[in-house]
Image: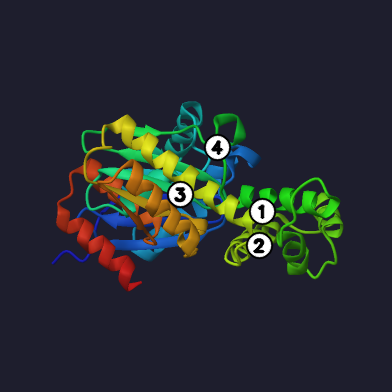
């Protein structure tokens, strides 16, 4: 009887702005090993250095899977869904850097939005909008056609996400305090969150980096809390975020010819999975107007599942493999 560990078909990598997940999966969908690490920031530390930080995670997953450390490939295929893989040149550089580690015989690199998309679908057909620290959208069809956006910030037409919303909230609150704009409860609620006595004190704390980037992100939920009180300024920001989410989804549907067909719209990322009722209700309303056959769904399945499924799709794995893989993550 052969007691050797099952061969890994896919090394799945979901590397985002806050965390990185790695999973080794067999051709029949068994989860062989997994590991979690920190943020993936090739735009800050360089592509080679960022990919090198994946190596200990791959090794940890290999050890958990019981695969030998013989210097050979750990899987047949790598499917990497990566944050900051926005432009073709970035995807190419990341592909080459991953291939250089010889973790597999073939490598595929996607933006991390595609991991969320596939994680939320039973087949590779649909649209996903991720609204976390930033905002992005992707769409795909079974024939391989995709829709995507540059998603590199203001210069590529982006607005919203947690990293932008707290700054927008501060903009309005600052103008309320100094008289340049309408009053808003944000003027008190934002500094109150850090036990500060004014927007002037909060501005100073942000300007001099007394508050960390992560602490500043705590102001985004405050914005939603204030919106729930009926504050017009805060409500306006929530509505605009809903418009941006819907606008991305509809644009992707148009690119793929799906606006008049039943299609799943996968919603993910911290802002959308936090359950803010005003935001989600407005997204549902706007989508119903623009694409009445679309079905929006908030998805909390780990995007690394989507990366693994994309890899299994490429290898022609049967539907039962996807079912087994999802069950493994649901159980874990």
Distance from disc 3 to disc 1, alpha carbons, whole Å, reads 17 Å
Q: Which residue is at 51% across, 58% downward? A: 270
Q: Position of residue 100 (x, y in %)?
A: 46, 36
Q: Earlier in the sequence, mark 3 or mark 2?
A: 3
Q: Which residue is mark 1?
A: 166
Distance from disc 4 to disc 1, alpha carbons, whole Å, reads 15 Å
Assess disc 4: are there few (<14), some (14-19) or many (≥20) residues with their C-alpha within 10 Å of its C-alpha: some
Count of numbered circles in the view: 4
Q: Which residue is at 42% across, 50% downward? A: 13
Q: Which residue is mark 2?
A: 218
Q: Which residue is mark 3?
A: 130
Assess disc 2: are there few (<14), some (14-19) or many (≥20) residues with their C-alpha within 10 Å of its C-alpha: some
Distance from disc 2 to disc 1, alpha carbons, whole Å, reads 8 Å
In this picture, is 331 found above or below 326? below
The quadrant of the rendering that contains the N terminus is bottom left
Question: Which numbered tag is attached to residue 311?
Answer: none
């Amino acid at each position: 009887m052969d007691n050797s560990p099952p061969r890994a078909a896919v090394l799945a990598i979901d590397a985002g702005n806050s965390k990185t997940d790695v999973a080794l999966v067999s051709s029949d969908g068994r989860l062989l090993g997994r590991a979690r690490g920190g943020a993936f920031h090739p735009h800050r530390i360089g592509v080679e250095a960022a990919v090198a930080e994946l190596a200990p995670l791959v090794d940890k997953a290999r050890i958990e899977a019981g695969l030998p450390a013989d210097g050979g490939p750990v899987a047949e295929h790598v499917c990497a869904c990566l944050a900051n893989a926005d432009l073709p040149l970035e995807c190419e550089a990341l592909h080459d850097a991953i291939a250089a580690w010889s973790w597999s015989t073939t490598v595929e690199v996607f933006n991390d939005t595609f991991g969320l998309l596939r994680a939320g679908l039973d087949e590779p057909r649909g649209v996903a909008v991720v609204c976390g620290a930033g905002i992005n959208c992707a769409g795909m069809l079974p024939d391989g056609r995709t829709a995507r956006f540059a998603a590199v910030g203001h210069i590529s037409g982006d607005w919203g996400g947690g990293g932008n919303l707290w700054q927008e909230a501060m903009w309005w609150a600052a103008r309320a305090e100094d008289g340049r704009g309408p009053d808003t409860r944000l003027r008190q609620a934002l500094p109150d969150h850090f036990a500060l006595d004014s927007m002037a004190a909060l501005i100073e704390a942000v300007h001099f980096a007394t508050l960390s980037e992560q602490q500043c992100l705590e102001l985004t939920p405050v914005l939603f809390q204030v919106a729930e009180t009926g504050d017009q300024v805060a409500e306006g920001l929530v509505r605009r975020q809903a418009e941006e989410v819907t606008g991305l989804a509809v644009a992707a549907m148009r690119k793929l010819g799906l606006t008049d067909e039943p299609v799943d719209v996968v919603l993910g990322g911290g802002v959308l999975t936090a359950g803010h009722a005003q935001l989600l209700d407005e997204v549902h309303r706007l989508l119903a107007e623009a694409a009445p056959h679309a079905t929006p769904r908030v998805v909390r399945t780990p995007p690394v599942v989507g990366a693994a499924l994309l890899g299994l799709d490429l290898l022609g794995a049967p539907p039962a493999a996807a079912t087994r893989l999802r069950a493994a993550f649901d159980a874990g």
